[in-house]
Image: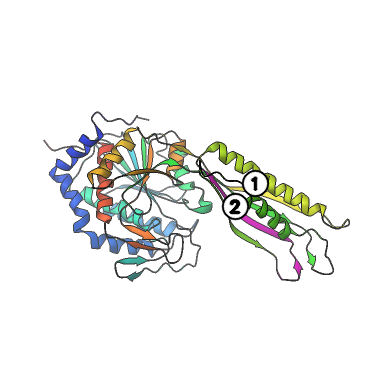
Amino acid sequence: MSSLAIARAPEQVVRDLLADERVARACRFFTEHADEITEEQAAICAIPAPPFGEAARAEYLAARFRQCGLTETEIDAEGNCVALRRGRAPHPLVVVSAHLDTVFPAGTNFTVRRAGAHLLAPGIADDGCGLVALVALLRALAANKLETEGSLLFVGTVGEEGEGNLRGARYLLTEGRWAREIDAFLSLDGPGVERITNTALGSRRYRVRFAGTGGHSWGDFGAANPVHALGRTIARLAAYPAPSDPRTTFNVGRVAGGTGVNVIPQEATMDVDLRSESETELQRLDAFFRRAAREAAADENAARRADAPPLELDIKLIGDRPGGATPADAPLVQLALAATRACGHEPHLDCSSTDSNIAIAAGLPALTIGAGGTSGNSHTLEEWYDPRGRDVGLRRALLLLLATCGFVRQA
């Protein structure tokens, strides 16, 4: 794997790019073709991509990559859509990615509606604007015959959301065909221009199941109750003194169990999300939560009738996202800061959980940035995206790609 380095000051690299007429034309491409890009975003988002059901959207993206001239295009073993745009040399090999999946289950209505300038649909911004950015960037590169010193790997990843546990990025960077060749990783996720996510937010996710014999609420009163044990666990977790610095959070996102108001449930389950900016604090919260579940089971069992069987407890890890950071003084971060300022915006570094987590954990320079525009109501059925200002975000992304990969100037 080659190291990523720049020979000149980042600001000078970006200024030199903007001074090249072909790069300037490519930057104007996003404004001149704004309506086409918006229409394509609506087309992409109308293709359902529920968790573990991203295949149709991946095939659409693969077809578009081929139409943009990328002959080395494939759907890999995990379901990622991967396409190579060769430069003069194999390295640096820079990944440009967006995630295919949404948080919404199969059967969700993904029809895109319009309200003035707003597009409304589940996943329209997260990550519809990132996916269409991949196509728009390729079109701008091709239309202006921009050649790079290194090579670009365009990827639509699966499994970024929820229980996907970053499976697409994990496969790409650990087992996939290009795993040992990648030099840097860039993810386009959501809207905006100022945000540069260089710190990976670590998280652990659990599915907890309490199981018992069940029974009648009157006749079998005194049997161990799985829902009561679930409630005890939640109460303990809710009392956890989560620090604000380093920021640490917890959430019970789903609960299920029981069949009727007068029925002692045979089982109860919940899904829990634990996050922290600090790996040490995450481990502390993780240990507290697992202990809370065991103590809740013990308390419920202690309160049961003497002749009633005890509850069984199963704690299953369903998500483990590593933390870490690309240092603020790393060349990739410095180039992103310079590109953002060159586009007229003041950047800020932040912390989030994205596909870049896996790249950072693998020791690669990695960032996640917005693809321009604005949005709201993320992860709800009323999610909206406003494409105004999208061209600025795409311009920033193009400058960052060319600066990182190396731009071949005409003699």
Q: Is residue 106 magenta?
A: no
Left or right side of 149 for 247: right
Residue highlighted by disc 2: 272
The three-letter code of the residue at mark 1 reads: Phe
SS type, badge 2: strand
Q: Quadrant of the C terminus?
A: top left
Structural distance between the alpha carbons of marks 2 and 1: 9 Å
User: Of the residues under marks 2 and 1, which one precedes in the sequence?
Assistant: 2
Give the percent coordinates (x, y) of residue 59. Answer: 38, 56
Measuring from the top left, give residue 233's x and y in whole percent. 68, 52
Residue 120 coordinates in the image, percent (x, y): 37, 67
Assess disc 2: are there few (<14), some (14-19) or many (≥20) residues with their C-alpha within 10 Å of its C-alpha: many
Magenta highlight: main SS: strand
The range drawn in magenta is: 259-276
Q: Residue at x 69, y 47 (%)?
A: 292
237 relative to 176 in the view: left or right: right
Provide the residue designation for mark 1. Answer: 289
Q: Quadrant of residue 212?
A: bottom right
Q: Is residue 261 magenta?
A: yes
Q: Are marks 2 and 1 in contact (CB under 8 Å)?
A: yes
Give the residue at x 25% y 54%.
Answer: 391
Lateral position of residue 21 relative to residue 9, left or right: left
State which mark lies toward you, 2 or 1.
Answer: 1
Amino acid under disc 2: Val
Residue appearing at x 32%, y 66% in the figure? 118
